[in-house]
Amino acid sequence: MILASSNKHKVEELRQILDREDLTPLPGEVEMPPEDGDTFADNALIKARAVRVQTGSVVIADDSGIEVDVLDGRPGVRSARFAGQGASDQDNLDKVLDEVAQAGGESAARYVCVIAYIDDAGSEHLFEGVCGGQMIAGKKGDGGFGYDPSFVPDETGSGDRRTMAELSPVEKHEISHRGKAARKLSRFLLA
């Protein structure tokens, strides 16, 4: 099973969540098309289909990002390149925090993940996970990646102000958008 990503964080996270050691990262020779879909599902399918055509393998691909209410849902599907093509996680986070600060300092937000799975027969399946929370003004914690240092999830409880970057991997997988989508995929694979 190939994960249509070379992001080592995603590969490791999904290996842990799915308990699949056979999940392999994107082979270097695979050419990926632009992620120019309008939705997370569109982009996940664009990636999965490209890998399937080039490898003939069973494929999973995800597209995920953060939607911030005061930014009218941005960065959304552009989360990985919000600060421009080739931007780092830090660049993207800094741009979101600057824009949130201009709009008042904190905002409701949600992480969204859609996983596309193409099976041996070529059938396509989609699994979505959402994790609601707050985008805060500062950065806390050194775990996770992306927007995690400034995202406080709702599901840890109203008195818990830890960011995703402060949670243990087990805690994060239990409530994260990717964890929820991956568990839906896992249940489907076991059915």
Image (tube, rainbow, N blue to C red):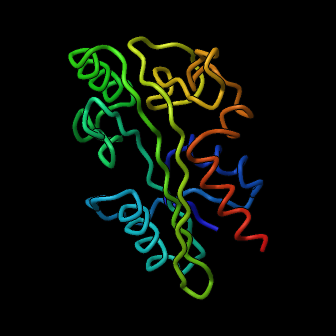
Residue at image position (56%, 21%) is: 163
Q: Is residue 1 visible?
A: yes
The x, y position of residue 63, in whole percent, is 44, 54
Quarter of the C terminus within the rendering: bottom right
Q: Residue at x 65, y 38 (%)?
A: 175
At 50% from the left edge and 61% from the top edge, which residue is drawn?
61
Looking at the figure, which quarter contains the N terminus?
bottom right
Q: Quadrant of residue 21?
A: bottom right
Residue farthest along the bottom direction in this orientation: 121
Q: Is residue 27 visible?
A: no
Q: Residue at x 47, y 59 (%)?
A: 28
On screen, residue 154 above or below 17: above
Above/below status of 58 relative to 31: below
Q: Residue 69 sits in which quadrant?
A: top left
Left or right: 116 in relation to 95: right
How far from the left and from the top, in percent, is residue 53? 44, 80
In the picture, residue 84 is in which quadrant?
top left
108 shown above or below 189? above
Q: Percent from the top left, x then y, of residue 6? A: 49, 51
Q: Nearer the viewer, residue 162 or 79?
A: 162
**In this view, which residue lies farthest toward the front?**
158
Q: Is residue 160 left or right of residue 140?
A: right
- Image position, residue 76 (x, y; %): 33, 44
Q: Is residue 102 left or right of residue 141?
A: left
Work out whether residue 143 or residue 185 is closer to the camera in this orientation and state it. Answer: 185
Left or right of 21 in this view: 49:
left
Q: Is residue 68 above or below residue 120?
A: above
